[in-house]
Amino acid sequence: AQKITQTQPGMFVQEKEAVTLDCTYDTSDQSYGLFWYKQPSSGEMIFLIYQGSYDEQNATEGRYSLNFQKARKSANLVISASQLGDSAMYFCAMREVRNFNKFYFGSGTKLNVKP
Amino acid sequence: NAGVTQTPKFQVLKTGQSMTLQCAQDMNHNSMYWYRQDPGMGLRLIYYSASEGTTDKGEVPNGYNVSRLNKREFSLRLESAAPSQTSVYFCASSAGLAETQYFGPGTRLLVL
């Protein structure tokens, strides 16, 4: 079974609007971490936000927030007030405590922000 | 701090040639990783190293070997390159469970 599933290969959003990128995960561990990364067309991988499985509050970092629904095993990334520079690939990833040396990545979502 | 560095940035090989991709990190991280990313796809783990002196296979290890030379350096070797190994290779390092991975800039490899 896929550990991380991102069901939106591509998305469009109007500049200044909010957008939600979906991510669901599969684990039997109680302790795990969830991560989102941005990959612009230049190719580098940029860390955006982290959510721990025991964190009671949703993580936020500036315009990024993570909508963490543990029972549904979902960890959606919300980008508020989209900017043209947000156009990129976005990857969701997970790390489990039983093998915390491994990261599992989803296939990514390509976000295009329209002016 | 340079973070994670990779050399070379770009390489063209002929089928059957060998080469080593170098990676170094200056963040004192125990864990290091090699991934490949094919066009339009996510990252696939080739090998990882939990600590100096240990290495483990990831999802796609065939055709590759690795060496964890010391805590800072983790190299990836292609003994006999094949066109299917044309890809972008990323090295990364990480600390504890709640810590992200830090990625190098990537190496673009073209095998003809």
Image: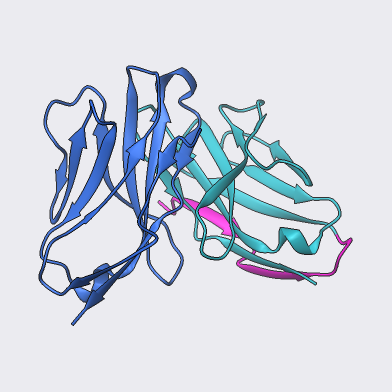
In the rendered view, tell whether residue B82 sits above or below residue A70: below
Question: In the rendered image, what is the letter of the chain coloured blue?
Answer: A
State the residue in front, B101 or B86: B86
Q: Is residue B55 left or right of residue B2?
A: right
Residue at position x 45%, y 35% in the image = A3
| Residue B98 visible from this viewpoint | no
Label tally: 0
Q: Whole-percent x and y of residue B98?
A: 32, 30
Q: Residue furthest bottom?
A: A115
State the residue in front, B45 or B8: B45
Q: Whole-percent x and y of residue A75?
A: 26, 40
Residue at position x 38%, y 49% in the image = A6
Q: Whole-percent x and y of residue B78?
A: 78, 52
Asked which quadrant contains residue A74, the reply is top left
State the residue in front, A20 or B7: A20
Asked which quadrant contains residue B12, the reply is bottom right
Q: Whole-percent x and y of residue A66?
A: 19, 43
State the residue in front, B90 or A72: A72
Q: Is residue B85 left or right of residue A44?
A: right
Residue at position x 14%, y 44% in the image = A60
Examine the structure image and report whether residue B9 is included in the region drawn in magenta: yes
Examine the structure image and report whether residue B54 is included in the region drawn in magenta: no
In the rendered view, tell whether residue B51 sits above or below residue B64: above
Write down the region rendered in magenta.
B1-17
Name the image colouring.
Answer: by chain
Q: Is residue A44 left or right of residue B47?
A: left
| Residue A59 visible from this viewpoint | yes
Task: Write down the colour of chain B.
Answer: cyan
In which quadrant will I find the C terminus of chain B?
Answer: bottom right
Residue at position x 12%, y 59% in the image = A80
